[in-house]
Structure formats: structure tokens, C-alpha cells
Image (cartoon, rainbow, N blue to C red):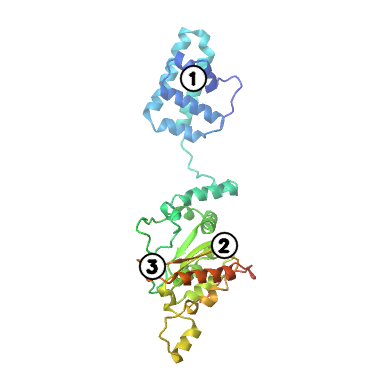
Amino acid sequence: MSSESATVLTFYGQQMLMLHRKYALSANAKKLLEAHDDWKHGRIDQDELGRLVRLSGNMRKAVTDTIAKCASVMRKKPAELKNCVDIIQACTEILSAADKPPSMDGFPLLKLPAEIRRNVYHQYTSKFLGGYRNAGAGFVPFPKKSSCACAGYAPPAFLQPRLINMALAATCQRVRNELLEYFYRKYQFHFSCGCELLQHLKTNVFLRKMLTSVKVHWTGPKSDKGFDLLAKCPKLKEFEIIISKSTTGNLTKRETQMREFFTSQKPPRLIDALGMDELILIRGVDTITVTHLQARQGARRSDEERANLGALLRDKLTRAREDGSLDEEGDD
């Protein structure tokens, strides 16, 4: 930003004196003079001022035409000398900014206050939400990382999935850390099974540390280990669990042993599903939601089971966390 003398006529002063109309300046000339005034007062930088001229031949022509018109006015009306000199000086500074090689330095993001950086991360990540967030689906890890036979996530028919471009995280390690911490703390993440939940929590340190909202379909042969690791996420506050007939496709070790000796024609109870013992040990959650699987994705359980499970989880999971430590190694 250049220093400004108290005697130099500002763009506002030019308008008050109606110099633009008096000198028959073009619309492009007025736009450049206004941009020059913005640069003088620090509202834009010199590179932005120069780009206005470099990117348009008409803009550069407007500068030279303005200088020629002011020179003509000076010859005809010597009383306008000072005003014309001020405008010509502004034009020469505009041309100087245009001829200066553009700076190759990147935007100093890390020099901004932390609050502004978080706002930048919010603007960057929120553009990927679209209808997903409004529909409650949140973000879904893709592609599926676990090798289990569980069905992957199937979005509702009215939603069009979009991949997230996290190129900003590749700029440097500090930006990557800050962006991922904000991303995992801010939004809800949907896992298609307990195996997928376990795989991501084991391999992603930032996710384990910052996860606050999660949505999981309770199914899969590793649901117990997934819930056990989820209990060690220190910032977990919102938990939505989806139940279906496949929830009892894998039973607890005790129930499996009992069924070897006690035959029963009745279907397995929800409380005997694999992961129940680990699920009720999760603590510190503020919001608990139990929902049915979409009918087109699998067989649904009864509303009574959903209501009973919701009451149980609200009683257990909302209790205060006894140990907020985080297991960095995860479980095998």
C-alpha cells in the first residue's frame, strides 16, 4: 500500500467536483480510478490493482486515454492543472502496478488469527455438503476400507453423492492438521457397519481425537471392537445408531456358546447382538438417536425394540465419562 499525500485528490473528491463528467472519462477509467483509491486506502493490494489492467486491453487503453484527455484539458484550462495532475499521477501508478511482475507468494493463511482460519476451513468444507447435511446423512467415508461382507452405504434416492476434494489438506502439515481437526469435530460421519467404524478409528488419529458426531449401522462381525474403540473417543457428543434384522446376525460370545447347548426356535434378541456389552459402556454422549434401516436396504426390526434400545442407551451413554483418555494404539 502506498502512502497518500494530504493534497492528493481522492476518488470521492473527484466525484464531488464532477471531474469524470467534466473530462468525459470512460466507465473503465472511473472503475480504475476507484480501484486506485481502494489500493491507497488498503482495501485491495497492488497485485489486484495490476490485474485489472493486465487482464483487459480495454482497461489499459482507458488509462492512456485518460492521460491524453487530462493533458488536453490542462492546455485549454490551466485552472484545472492540479486536478489533472492528480488524475495523471493516479494513472501512472495504475500502469506501474500493471507492469510490476505479480507476486508468486501464496496467501499467508497461517498468519491469520485462529478464528479466521477456522472460518476459512468452514467455508471450504461446507461447500461439499449440498443436500447431504440437510438430509442428516453427514459425510460418508468412501471407498469402503474394511474387507467385511457387510453392505456398503446406499444414499437415499433423492440424494446425489459427491466426492470431497480435500486438496487444501495437502498444502502443508500444519494446515492439514488444523483442517482435519476442524472437519472431524464439526460434522457427522456415517459408517455402514461396525467393521468400517473400527477400520477408520484404528487408522485415523485425528478422527479418534476429534469425532463428535457419528452415525453407525449396528451390524458386522467386528461391531464389538468398533464400539469399544468408539468409547475411547473423548469428544463424542452425538450418536445415532441404526438397527435392522442383520444387527443380530452376529451374537455375543456368551449367546453363541449357549445356543450350542440350548436350542431355540425364537429369533435372537437385540440385547444378544454382538457389541451390546461394549455399546452400553460408552459415556459422555449428549444426544442419542435410534433409527430403523431403510426398508429398501434390509429387513427392519420392530418399533418396540427401537424404543427400548433408545431408552437403554439414553440411560447408559449419557452418564459422565469416567476416563477421558484416548487409546492411541487402538485394538486389534
Which amino acid type is marked by label 1? Ile
* Residue at mark 2 to residue at mark 3: CA–CA distance: 25 Å
* Residue at mark 1 to residue at mark 2: CA–CA distance: 63 Å
Q: Residue at x 52, y 22 (%)?
A: 11
Total labels drawn: 3
Judge by depth and name the residue closer to the eye, 209 or 217.
217
Judge by depth and name the residue closer to the eye, 154 or 264.
264
Name the mark nearer the viewer: 1 or 2.
2
Q: Can you say whether 101 is above or below 212 in the image?
A: above
Q: Position of residue 187 (x, y in %)?
A: 50, 57
Which amino acid type is marked by label 2? Lys
Task: Characterize the local packing of mark 1: few (<14), some (14-19) or many (20 or more) Cα atoms within 10 angstroms.
Answer: many
- Residue identifier under label 3: 152
- Residue identifier under label 1: 88
Q: Residue at x 44, y 77 (%)?
A: 248
Q: Position of residue 312 (x, y in %)?
A: 55, 71
Q: Residue 237: which numbered mark, if any?
A: 2
